[in-house]
Image (cartoon, rainbow, N blue to C red):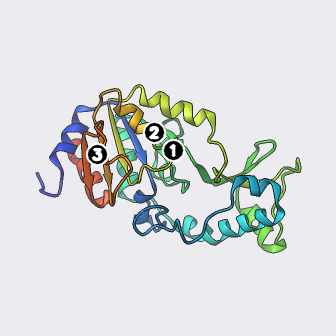
Amino acid sequence: MNKAIDERLVELLCRSDRILIFTGAGISTGSGIPDFRGPQGVWKERMPVYYQDFMSSEKARIEYWDYKLEGKKTFENARPNEVHNACALIERVGKLEMLVTQNIDGLHSAAGTSREKLVEMHGTNSFVECQSCGERSEPEPHFEYFEKHRRPPICKCEGFLKPATISFGQSLREEDLRRAFAAAEKTDLAISLGSTLSVHPAASVPLAAAQRGIPYVIINRGVTDQDGHPAVTLRLEGDVSKIFPPAVKTSLGR
């Protein structure tokens, strides 16, 4: 076996049939999307608007749409990388229980992970959503309107529109939480990829699975909030794209 491939990770993958994968921003840096909280994260550069401010202030809504407009090209130009493809491969061979992601970039879907096996805990940039009626629509016309008029777009029901992501201070969707924690009850292996595991309740999902006594693997470049936890079976430090995809392919004989 290639020395770069961790044999312990390969063995765990081989023995598992219902894998829960939890992913964070660290897996998308290879696709050109900046990390948010990692060592080179953008957390301190600009704090997005809080949801309560968005709902109560026209100025805050303009600031929010400006913030989203700044990052729009980055997300549009991003393509799935080897980590996204490895996650999709695990589903194709029938070994994925659920993929729970903190990411809003839509790259797991683009790589082929099905909607049935995907929980986007913090929403997605792929749609714009009305905060009153809940209707979703394609983002491009709304961004064009904002660029042209410098006014936040409004739904036909007169509700406020925003990209279908979870903003600071906004509650996670109950259905997403239900699906994620239900998967944690069924999985026989939990793997966290590229997350500092510092944002809850999302980061509680793989730990909830591990506390049932199943193996739990953390792969990340930099410290995580769950390092040293007694439920962690294997902690691998480094670039997820160099550790996880080769192990997946080896475990499947690819």
Q: How far apart are the alpha carbons under marks 3 and 1? A: 18 Å
> Residue visible at 66% across and 50% down?
169
* 158 lies left or right of 24: right
Element carrying mark 2: helix
- Nearer to the camera, 77 or 51: 51
Pointer 1 residue: 200
Pointer 3 residue: 228
Q: Amino acid at mark 2?
A: Ser
Contact, CB < 8 Å: mark 3 with mark 2?
A: no
Q: Amino acid at mark 1?
A: His
Element carrying mark 3: loop
Element carrying mark 1: loop
Q: Amino acid at mark 3?
A: Gly
Indicate which disc residue 136 carries: none
Q: How far apart are the alpha carbons under marks 3 and 2? A: 15 Å
3 or 2: tag closer to the N-terminus: 2
Q: How far apart are the alpha carbons under marks 2 and 1? A: 6 Å
Q: How many marks?
A: 3
> Residue visible at 31% across and 41% down?
229
Residue 241's place in the image compared with 144, above or below, is: above
Residue 108's place in the image compared with 230, above or below, is: below
Pointer 2 residue: 204
Contact, CB < 8 Å: mark 2 with mark 1?
A: yes
Q: Neighbour class for label 2 at 10 Å: few (<14), some, many (≥20)?
A: some
Q: Kindly report which numbered mark, 3 or 2, lies closer to the viewer in this rendering.
A: 3
- Nearer to the camera, 182 or 38: 38
